[in-house]
Structure formats: C-alpha cells, structure tokens
Amino acid sequence: KEAKILSMIPIGNDRHTRLTLECQGLTYDSVLFGVCSDDLPMVEDDIVDIIFTPDINNFRGKSVQLILKDIQRCESDLRQDERDDELYDRFTRNENLTSAEAARIRPVRKELVAVWRGVNRHASEGMLKTDITKLQGKLRQESGTELNRAKLLIALDVFSELGLFVHEVTDNILIVYTRKVSRKADISTSMILRRLKAFE
C-alpha cells in the first residue's frame, strides 16, 4: 500500500517497465512485464498500491526485485478522483456548490496555462488521445501545480467554450482536437469560470 514511484523506465523495447518504488523509507526495484510505461495511468511521484512476488535478479550480481502482478493508484487518490468527478458532474448539471466545492474545481490562471501548454505540447498533428489520469499526472508534474481531475476537466471545457479545443472523454480516455487560432483568447469571457466564481 502507498508506494511512491521514484522512476519508471521502459525496458525490452518498451514492452515492459522497470519501476523504482519507495515505501516506508525503503527503496525497491521492480519490473512490470507486458506493460509499456506509456500504458500506465501514472507518472513519477504518484502513490500506488501494488501486488507483487519477490524474485532474485541475477543480472550483474544478485539483488532482490519485485515482480509486479498489478499496480494502481492508491485508494485515497482513487476516492478523491471519484469525489472530484461528482463535483464536476454536479456543476455541469447546474446544481449549487458550496464556496469550498467551487474553489476545489475552479482552475487558477497557472493551472489553465499548464493545461493549454501541456495539451499542445503532447498533441501530435492537432490531436491528443490519452488516459486522462495520466495526462493529469504529467501536467501536474510539468507545471508544479496541484491540478486535480475536476480542474483539468473544467479547463478543457473552458478552452472548448472559447473555441480553442474540441474534446471528449469516454471511459477515462480523453481525445482533444486542437485548433489554430489567430487571436489571443480572453479567459475572463468564459461563462464557465464566471459561474464557478459566483459560488465563492
């Protein structure tokens, strides 16, 4: 329970992933066979729960390694994602939010910039298709923000509202189509952000 990912390295032509994990002050080398690093919905510094069998690694001397049988984000993070999804859904259904709930899902300028730059950086030929949880982790890591799942969804809605993106989310898979724009968008005109601000 609650192991921190220190590193994720693709091995075997990216057919497998080597992870360094830290748990209760101890560091463990581990291998996840048959899963490439890009297919994992997590990034370095994420906290995960794992199922493993211990093994002796005889490559370049003997060492203990963990053979991962399953890995997922830790239960507390999964529960927080569920709560954020619920807040986002309530907002999109035009239900009332408390000021604390609105603040929880309203992205600040730095987070909006992180989403804008990150989506454009990771898009290829005007399109990005990715696991939304993995993208959230990457953007959080790259920007040094506490971008949560609901803030990411709201930011995507804002950019779609302003005509900068077209996006859809199905079964945790996000598809974004970026658009070339000749004008600078005025975020302050977003009705979504105004609605959220009105709850505070």
Image (spheres, rainbow, N blue to C red):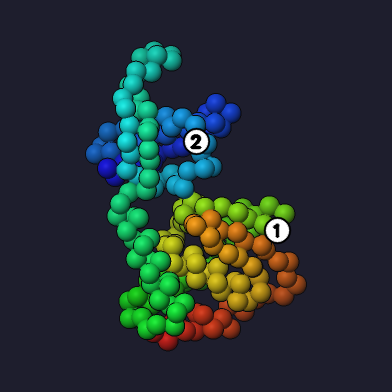
In the picture, the disc for residue 79 is none
Whether residue 142 appears in this view of the structure is no
The tag earlier along the polypeptide, 1 or 2, is: 2
In the picture, the disc for residue 126 is 1
The 10 Å Cα crowd at callout 2, few under 14, some 14 to 19, many 20 or more, is some
x and y, in percent, of residue 195 in the image: 47, 84
Whether residue 151 appears in this view of the structure is yes
Q: Quadrant of the C terminus?
A: bottom left
Q: Residue furthest bottom?
A: 198
Q: Quadrant of the N terminus?
A: top left
Q: Residue at the location (29% across, 55% down)? A: 76
Q: Circle 2 — which element?
A: loop
Q: Residue furthest left?
A: 24
In the picture, the disc for residue 35 is 2
Identified by mark 2, the residue type is: Val
Mark 1–mark 2 contact, CB under 8 Å?
no
Q: Residue at the location (54% across, 62% down)? A: 169
